[in-house]
Image (cartoon, helix red, strand yellow):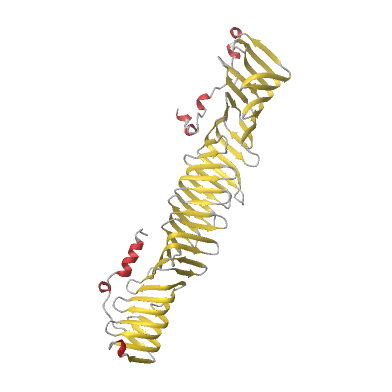
Amino acid sequence: MKHYLFFGFLCLLFISPAVLAQKTVIHIERAKRANYDARLGKDVQRLVGDVILRQDSTLFYCDSAYLNEKTRNFDAFGSVHINVNDSMDIYSDRLIYNGDTRIAELFDNVKLIDDSTVLETQYLLYNRITKLAHYPNNGRITQGEKVLTSVKGYYQSDIKEFYFRKEVVLLTPDYETYSDTLVYNSKSQIAWFYGPTVIRSDENTLYGAYGWYNTLTDQAYLTKRPSIYTMEQMVYADTMFYDRNTGFGRAGGHVEVVDTNYQVIVKGAFGQLWEHEGKSYVTDSAMAVSYDSGDSLYMHADTLFLYFDKEREAKKMEAYYGVRFFRTDLQGVCDSLSYLMSDSTIRMYRDPVLWSDQNQLTADSIHIMMTNKALDSLVMYNNAFIVSRDSIKGFNQIKGKDMIGYFEENELDRIAVEGNAQTVYWVREEDKNLIGINLAKASRMLIKLLESQINEIIYRSSPNEVMYPEKDLPPSEEKLKGFKWLDALRPTDKMDIYRDVHKE
């Protein structure tokens, strides 16, 4: 459907009839009384009582009429009825008809009925040649349970197409549509939008500047930055398809999902939604932002999934493949990640690496617990390892089967090491002079940190500790088994989360 449909309608309404039709006579099929009135001219007949006039195949009914046989024009009054064809009829209280142009001008209580569609207005122009009807001041269309109103409207009867302008409202039992410009086909029952449009239901509200809505299937396609709103969520995109019956949606180009309850924004270039299943995903440059009045966390992955309940409350977010995230006080990478809203816990899987200030943390999996969006604690499962650079030389290291870390004001404050605990610790004076390198082993340890550096080690059971001068430290003891320094992987800012470290 072309954008110039409105101008086409105008051309059809006012196009020269001489091009389109030959002049034909208006026949008097019936009248109870007929006479010439000298006051009106010698060519004007006054017809009264059950009047029926015909031009070509169109019949005109009324209570009375004035017919000018020379000009082929007539005025009709009372119970006016135009039978255009087998399916369309037009009714009004008064009619002015031009037999040459075939244009009917209808006044007061106008009703056009075409199959199951009914148009009501107070003034209507109908061109029999172009088959175009026009109302310039407020009209109402009903089709079954659908009701459509607008200030201006056009109806192309041969293709069953309505064109509406200004304050357009489409009402059904399930939703309301408000638009500036709308085209509706009564046969296909598809509405096209050519201006800002809002489709509102109890479940959500759709907005778009261009697109269509199939009122039979409850499917919509919107472009020009459309959006869907619920009580807690907003979805934006460049293009959007949505099926109300199945709850399936698809969005493309600059997709953005905003959850105001949990203060999360998910972005990407393509996304899909399964509303009834409580699942959606975004991919292609996908990013999630957890925002608040303080620090925000930015995360990138190949694909981000968001799960929600029947009330559209977000329950869980999952990130798959190439996960990288950045917050001023916390950075991380892993293969996959999940965040459960009920316990505010981030779970990192497969080769996770976490950085907190100067500390690098690795394990088979890492769980980070948040409280009011602040870091509370973390658990490192299997092969737990913490590394930080010494202030001058070497690396401080903590290793164990599992570790539990506790944060104070978003900084690691203490670490409990459970099972096969080992440390390599460069002990220095306050002036940074090296005292020695401390190597310790125990079943369990509690390590206290100060300004992200090891400040005190408390051995819980079976300690084994030795202090080496730097010159006497065996090279094999300088680094614990499994040591890796992965600083090159660390995201440096919120845009660095998109860096593909595998290509470097």
Query: In this rendering, does residue 239 appear at all?
Result: yes
Q: Nearer the viewer, residue 269 or 320?
A: 269
Q: Nearer the viewer, residue 249 or 38?
A: 38
Q: Does residue 325 appear to the left or right of 119 in the view shown?
A: right
Residue 132 in the image: state x and y as whole percent.
36, 70
Residue drawn where x is 53% and y is 36% of the image: 299
Q: How many marks?
A: 0
Residue 106: image quadrant is: bottom left
Q: Nearer the viewer, residue 400 or 94?
A: 94
Task: Pick the quarter of the image with the N terminus.
Answer: bottom left
Query: In this rendering, does residue 88 appear at all?
Result: no
- Which residue of the protein is positioned furthest toward the top in this rendering? 471
Residue 4 in the image: state x and y as whole percent.
34, 60
Q: Does residue 371 appear to the left or right of 271 in the view shown?
A: right
Residue 220 in the image: state x and y as whole percent.
48, 56
Residue 417 in the image: state x and y as whole percent.
68, 24
Residue drawn where x is 35% and y is 82% of the image: 75
- Which residue of the protein is positioned furthest toward the front in this rendering? 39
**Is residue 387 depicted above or below 171 in this figure?**
above
Task: Pick the quarter of the image with the C terminus.
Answer: top left
Q: Does residue 123 appear to the left or right of 492 in the view shown?
A: left
